[in-house]
Amino acid sequence: MRTQVAIIGAGPAGLLLSHLLAQGGVDSVVLETRSEEYVAARIRAGILEHSSVELLESAGLGARLRAEGDEHRGIYLQWPGERHHLDFVNLTGRSVWVYGQTEVQKDLIAARRAAGQEIHYEVSDVELHDLEASPYVTYTDSNGRSARIDALAVAGCDGSFGVSRKAVPAAETFERVYPYSWFGILADVAPSTDELIYAWHPDGFALHSMRSATVSRLYLQVPNGTDPQFWSDDQIWDALATRLGHGQNGWKLTPGPITDKSVLPMRSYVQTPMRHGNLFLAGDAAHIVPPTGAKGLNLAIADVALLSRALVARFAGKDDRLADAYSETAQRRVWRCTHFSWWMTTMLHTSGDPFDAQLQLSQLRWVASSEAGATGLAENYAGLPIFL
Ligand code: RFL
Ligand code: PHB
C-alpha cells in the first residue's frame, strides 16, 4: 500500500487530520488498534473552545454541533458560600460549546466514511520504519495478515500509549503528576445548572458539566488509586451535593441514575520536538494536560489544524517552511494550555495544606472580582486563535 500520509490513530486528531488533508488534496491511510464501535463510544472531553468550533465549521463538520450542541457564555466559579459567573462573551467576545468528544468522533467517522477514507481498525503490532528517509509502517491487520504502508510522511496521532511518541529519539520530556484523580460519572438526569460549575471545597474539587438537556456529567476530586466500585451511588451524589453547594441560596442538585463511573488520573506531560524526520506528532501523542482547563481535545484540534496546513504546503505546494516550523509553532500553544491547565488544577484541587487553601481562596476571589483576573481566565478557557 502506498499513500502520502500514514496516520497512526483514529481518535479526533487522526480523523480530523485525514479530513483536512483530503480537503487540501493530500491522501492518507489511517490505522487504529481499536474497533470502530469502541472508538465511537469512548466517553471523554466535553468542551469545544471558540476556535475549535470555527475550525470544525469551516471544515464542513459543524452542522450537528450547531444543531445539537449548546453554546455557553461562560462558567461558574465557586467556593463555600459564594458562586460567581464569569461571562466570557462580555470579557473576550468568545463563547464555548458543550458538545462531547464522543459526538465529535461520530461526526468525524461519518464524514470520513462518506468520503471513502481508508481506515483500518483493529490492527496490531504497528511499527514505524526509516522515518528520516523513506518512511513505512508495518502492522498486522484485523485478519492476522502482515501489511505494509509506504508513505511520504507519518502522522503520530496515537495518543499517550501509542508507538509514535517513542519513535522520536532523544526527545526532551516534561512531566508533572498530581496527587489526585477525577472520579467522573455520567447520569441520566437534566443538568442542575445552565453552565458548568467549577467548585473549590475543603473536601476536594467538584465539577458539574453536562452532555445534553437530559444527560449530566459530574466529577469529584478523589485520591489516586480510588476504585469507583467502592463508592455507592448515594455516596457519590452526597459528595457532589456537599461540594457543589446544594441548599445554598436555594440551589439544588438533582440526582439521577448513574450510567457510567470511571477514575481518570491527572498528568501534565509535554514532549519536544513534535517531529523526527518525516514523523510528525499531534494531540495526546505529544502532550497530556489535566482536564481542569478542558484543553485536551482542543489542543489536538489545534495541532492538526497546523499540521494539515504544513503537510498540504509540503506535498501539494512543494513548500517545506510550515513543516519545518511545525513543532515550534505548535509548542507555543501547547505550553500556554499546559500552564493554564496546571493553574486551574492547582487553584481548584485541595492538597490538604492549610496554607495552600488560603492561597487558593485568595486567588479565586481575585479572579472572580477583578476584571483583569476574570479576563485572563476567560481568554485562556474560551481559547486563543489557532494560528498564534
Ligand atoms: P486519542 O483520543 O487518545 O486517540 C488516539 C487513538 O490512537 C489509537 N492508538 C493506536 N492506533 C494505532 N496504532 C497504535 N499503536 C495505537 N495506539 C493507540 C487509540 O486507540 C486512539 O483511538 O488522542 P487524540 O486524537 O490526540 O485526542 C486527544 C483527546 O482524546 C484527549 O486530549 C482528551 O480526551 C483528554 N481527556 C479529557 N479531556 C478533557 O478535556 N476532559 C475530559 O473529561 C477528558 N477525559 C480524556 C478523558 C482522556 C482520556 N484518556 C486518553 C485516557 C478521559 C480519558 C479516559
Ligand atoms: C466534561 O464535560 O467532560 C468536562 C468539562 C470541563 C472540563 C473537563 C471535562 O474542564
Image (cartoon, helix red, strand yellow):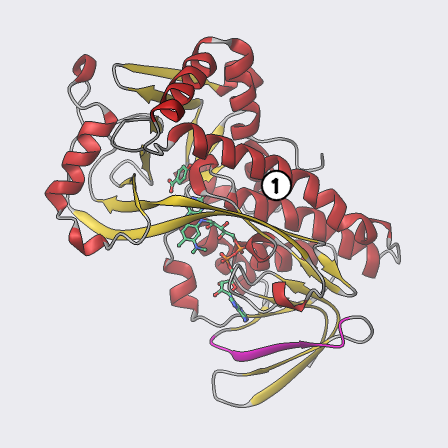
Q: Position of residue 296 (x, y in %)?
A: 51, 45
Residue visible at 36% across and 34% down?
Answer: 351
Residue 272 screen position, x and y as percent: 69, 52
Q: Is residue 282 left or right of residue 371?
A: right
State whether the magenta stretch is mostly helix, strand or loop: strand
- Identify residue type, mark 1: Leu
Report the front residue among 99 and 238.
238
For the residue pair 189 and 203, the one nearer the viewer reads as 203
Q: Please, is residue 249 above or below residue 140 in the view?
A: above
Reply above or below: 88 against 307.
Answer: above
374 relative to 152 in the view: left or right: left
Is 118 contained in the magenta span?
no
Q: Residue at x 52, y 29 (%)?
A: 381
Where residue 134 appears, as percent x and y from the top left, is: 80, 76
The magenta segment: 122-131
Up-down: is 41 above or below 342?
Answer: below
Residue at 69%, 39% (x, y): give it: 332
Which quadrant does the C terminus fall into?
top right
Q: Position of residue 386 (x, y in %)?
A: 66, 37
What's the residue at 55%, 17% (across, down)?
375
Q: Can you say which quadrant of the picture contains the N terminus? A: bottom right
- Left or right: residue 192 versus residue 92 is left
Where is mark 1, residue-wise?
Answer: 55
Q: Quadrant of residue 99?
A: top left
Residue at the extreme bottom: 145
Check disc 1 and report its element: helix, strand or loop.
Answer: helix
